[in-house]
Image (spheres, helix red, strand yellow):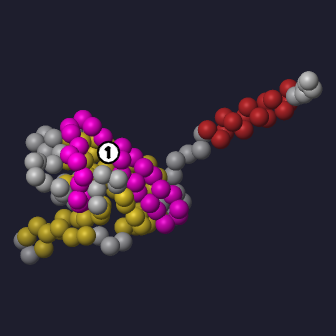
């Protein structure tokens, strides 16, 4: 059996590499991720979150997927001619350092064709893909459509 001796300096270098590697900063932050419970017979719902871009350049959300749904889209509510309208957002860009809150009455994720029926306090995974190649899968907790969400 051959014994390899590693110098003290080599051990310290390896340890620092492991520590620094574990400290890589997330550049896109998702917080307050939640999805509304669906009433019986309904297969569409809305999901909300707070998204922060810590990159030094803008990022674009280019895809959203969820294994429990047929499709997920970004939508927004608009007030037009005294009426509230909802429309699909075709391009969603987040500036450097910007935080955007997805909330009722504003930007939100519309989740269509839900398979099964996630229950209150369970969570479901939604994946967001960005034009820089990053993809983030995050758990969204199911909350009652009767309760108000508070931060």
Residue 3 screen position, x and y as percent:
91, 24
Q: Quarter of the image containing the N terminus?
A: top right
Is residue 108 visible from the viewing direction of this image? no
- Could you tell me which residue is drawn at 19 percent across and 65 percent down? 77
**Placement of 108 over or under 151, stated as above or below:** below
Instruction: Let me know if residue 132 is in the magenta part.
Output: yes
**Placement of 130 over or under 127, stated as above or below:** below
Residue 87 screen position, x and y as percent:
21, 70
The residue indicated by pointer 1 is: 124
Q: Nearer the viewer, residue 83 or 40?
A: 40
Residue 138 screen position, x and y as percent:
39, 46
Q: Is residue 23 left or right of residue 115?
A: right
Q: Secondary structure at mark 1?
A: strand
Q: Is residue 30 left or right of residue 80?
A: right
- Could you tell me which residue is drawn at 40 percent across and 64 percent down? 63
Residue extending farthest to the bottom is: 81
Q: Quarter of the image containing the C terminus?
A: top left
């Amino acid at each position: 059996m051959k014994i390899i001796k590693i110098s003290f300096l080599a051990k310290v270098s390896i340890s620092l590499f492991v520590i620094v590697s574990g400290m890589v900063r997330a550049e896109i932050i998702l917080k307050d991720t939640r999805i509304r419970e669906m009433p019986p017979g309904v297969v569409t719902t809305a999901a909300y979150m707070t998204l922060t871009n810590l990159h030094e350049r803008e990022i674009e959300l280019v895809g959203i997927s969820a294994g429990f749904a047929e499709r997920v889209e970004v939508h927004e509510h608009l007030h037009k001619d005294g009426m509230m309208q909802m429309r699909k957002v075709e391009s969603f860009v987040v500036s450097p350092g910007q935080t955007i809150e997805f909330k009722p009455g504003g930007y939100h994720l519309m989740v269509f064709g839900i398979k099964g029926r996630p229950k209150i306090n369970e969570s479901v995974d939604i994946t967001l893909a960005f034009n820089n190649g990053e993809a983030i899968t995050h758990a969204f907790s199911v909350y009652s459509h009767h309760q108000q969400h508070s931060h």
